[in-house]
Image (cartoon, coloured by chain):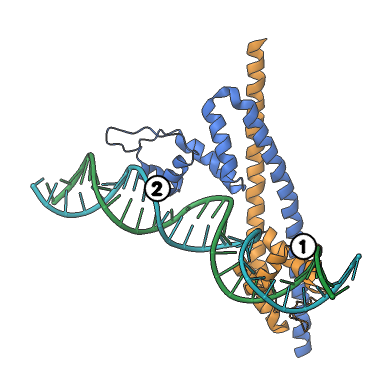
Chain colours: A blue, B orange, C cyan, D green
Amino acid sequence: MKIGQLAKLSNLSIHTLRYYEKIGLIEKVYRNQSKQREYDDDILIWLEFINRLRETNMPLKGQIEYAKLRAKGNTTIGQRCEILEDHLQKLIIAQQKLNSNIKAMEAKIQIYHQLEIGNETKHT
Amino acid sequence: MKIGQLAKLSNLSIHTLRYYEKIGLIEKVYRNQSKQREYDDDILIWLEFINRLRETNMPLKGQIEYAKLRAKGNTTIGQRCEILEDHLQKLIIAQQKLNSNIKAMEAKIQIYHQLEIGNETKHT
DNA sequence: CATTGACCTAGAGTATGCTCTAGCTTTTAT
DNA sequence: ATAAAAGCTAGAGCATACTCTAGGTCAATG
């Protein structure tokens, strides 16, 4: 498939797709006789995966490191697994932090609501 | 307290503290006769709160908007409350997203482990 | 056969959130 | 009293992750 089509399916811009290739997040894409990129359908699965890494705040640097290992083939599965496990650790910490931030935010909102009720009471 | 002291207590750099004042995230700080900043202890509570907003990915723009309302006093409690409720909504969505990303990551790691065992089996 | 639209490259520009520099003044410790 | 440490301003610089521009090529359509 051509880049425009992939952009639609992946929700990434054409610019971003070319950029990802340039920085090595996507392997060099096959070109047809007119030097236009022809993507394999598989790319969508990879883009979905790196989307997950991005959503979970893995920096591009780390994603690229992972991509390079992936490009080397199955012998790097151990290393990739390690990266994912490290990343998962960070996510679990982020999850705990987020949970506690949510609780704190809810508590703060509660207090504000009580203050508002307090203000109303003064006026009645 | 002077800026160096506050930097230590808040874990923000001196540069960042001055920057936060410049952009209006911290109200204009009292200056002594030598134009050096003298912070009130209260600032720490505010810094702790905006740290929470930052940790939860509220952009500086939004934090500044909140700060301006806070500076106006108690009449803005309703508006601030709305901002926090909107933000909380985003956090809850982020929480769900994170939970599902964690699950997906765990599943992927599981699969990798099975592949590794598979590889070992081939070699024995 | 010409024009429109999709594609190409290289490189510049943007947004966010700091972070640091230069050049100077004030404070503090010996 | 003097030197090191801490503070000041204005503005430049940096890292990340895109995003867009200029100036072209190529393919399909009326």
Give how far across and how far down residue A90 sits, in percent.
70, 44
Q: Is residue B47 left or right of residue B121?
A: right
Image quarter hosting the N terminus of chain B: bottom right
Q: In which quarter of the image is residue B84?
A: bottom right
Same subunit: marks 1 and 2: yes
Tell which subunit mark 2 falls on: A
Q: Which residue is drawn at 78% across and 73% down?
A: B43
Numbered badge on residue A14: 2
Q: Residue at x 40, y 34 (%)?
A: A29
Q: In this view, does B19 lie to the left or right of A120?
A: left
Tell which subunit mark 1 falls on: A
Residues at marks 1 and 2 touching, judged by CB atoms closer than 8 Å? no
Give how far across and how far down residue B69 sits, in percent.
66, 78
- Residue type, label 2: Ile
Query: Dot 1: within a 10 Å radius of its alpha carbon, few (fewer than 14), some, or many (20 or more) residues?
Result: some
Give how far across and how far down residue D12 sits, in percent.
54, 64
Numbered badge on residue B79: none
Give how far across and how far down residue B104 sits, in percent.
63, 39
Q: B108 or A74: which is nearer to us?
A: A74
Q: Which residue is drawn at 64% across and 38% down?
A: B105
Asked if residue B78 can be seen in this view, the reply is no
Q: Distance between the residues labelled 1 and 2?
A: 41 Å
- Residue at label 1? A104
Asked if residue A21 can be seen in this view, the reply is yes
Mark 1: secondary structure: helix
The answer to which of marks 1 and 2 sits earlier in the sequence is: 2
Q: In this view, does D23 lie to the left or right of B81?
A: left
Mark 2: secondary structure: helix
Q: Residue at x 62, y 49 (%)?
A: B97
User: Compared to B39, does A97 lie above or below?
Assistant: above
User: Compared to A108, does A14 lie above or below?
Assistant: above
